[in-house]
Amino acid sequence: MTLIFDIGNTNIKTALFEGNSLKQVWRLSTDIKRTGDEYFSILRPLFRDSQIEFSDIDKIVLSTVVPALIGPFVIVSQHITGKKPILLSPENYDKLPIKIPETAKHEIGTDLLCDALAAWTKYKAPCIIADFGTALSFTALDQKGTVAGVAIAPGIRTAFNSLFNNTAQIPAIPLDIPETSLGKNTVVAVQSGIVLGYKGLVEGLLANMKADLEKECGIKQKDILVIATGGLNSMIAPITKVFDKLEKDLTLEGIKIAGDFIES
């Protein structure tokens, strides 16, 4: 089995693959103050309760956008398998079947890289991946499997938390889809502004990126696949028709694929 650590700014996804099948996903809170021993003590009962032995793990692949947690998760990996994990980094991007421009190699996050890798492996087509996480990111791939560019905005929850934390009279509310954009109270007004506002952001930015892919890469807009991933895409997907595919676990699948290429 392959163990994946996908370390984001808010959550750490811990996933187990048996072959290419995703068998288990656990989510931990990202906390740079925790040590490797502390993270291991959290993971150990999760493995036990799922009746998974550490000896079942053949390799560990680590992807992180939080550099401070590389050391702790190297320790976690050593506790589990007795060896260091495969760490995704610009030094091993050349082993992957997608291309990253030299100017972007040390800029693009491993999460976005793995989104692109999984999308290209599945569809072999020009595409834009919208990843709804702490940040809302859009990664574009051209018809040759080259990362053509990235756009990044604050994530939906990030924007709401900023609004809530910096205004005295905005309460904490559920970010549900409102029935109307015409808010008659604070709750609906905020839902309209955030949820419907992000619908407009997503649709507008995707339209711009498609036009730029056509202009810069010669790709017809109708041939560009739009893929949504990330836990927060469920807020926008029901109220727009811009997504061709919904891939809940795209990043995890990409990390698994990357680990296979780097190891081979």
Image (cartoon, rainbow, N blue to C red):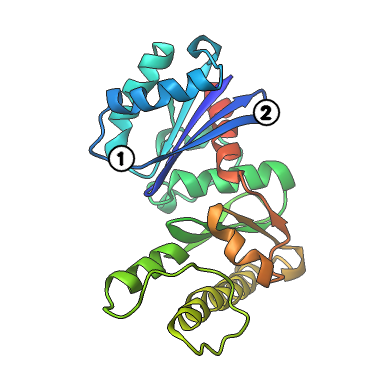
Q: Residue 174 at what x, y percent from top left?
A: 48, 67
User: Does 262 appear above or below 251?
Assistant: above
Residue underneath mark 2: 20
Q: Toward which corner of the image does residue 96 lie, by quadrant?
A: top right
Q: Is residue 168 visible?
A: yes
Please state the horizontal and vertical placement of residue 166, each as a whole percent of the image. 27, 74
Q: In which quarter of the image is residue 58?
A: top right
* Residue 237, disc: none
Q: Does residue 29 appear to the left or right of 137 in the view shown? A: left
Residue 257 shown left or right of residue 168 in the figure? right
Residue 87, percent from left and from top: 42, 30
Identify whether 224 is placed above or below 170.
above
Mark 2 nearby-residue class (10 Å; few <14, some 14–19, many ≥20)? few
Q: Work out which quarter of the rendered image holds the C terminus and state it.
A: top right
Near mark 1 (Cα within 10 A), the count class, few <14, some 14-19 or many ≥20, is: few
Q: Name the residue under label 1.
A: 67
| Of the pair 180 and 133, the residue shown nearer to us | 180
Q: Which of marks 1 and 2 is nearer the N terminus?
A: 2
**Residue type beneath disc 1:** Pro
Q: Is residue 215 left or right of residue 73?
A: right
Residue type at numbered disc 2 = Asn
Q: Compared to 59, does 125 lie above or below? A: below
- Contact (CB < 8 A) between labels 1 and 2? no
Which residue lies at the image location 36% right of the left edge and 16% below the top edge?
Answer: 78
**Secondary structure state at the residue bearing disc 1:** helix
Q: Using the image as rendered, state which of residue 5 and residue 119 is in the foreground.
A: 5
Query: How many numbered discs sit on the rendered protein?
Result: 2
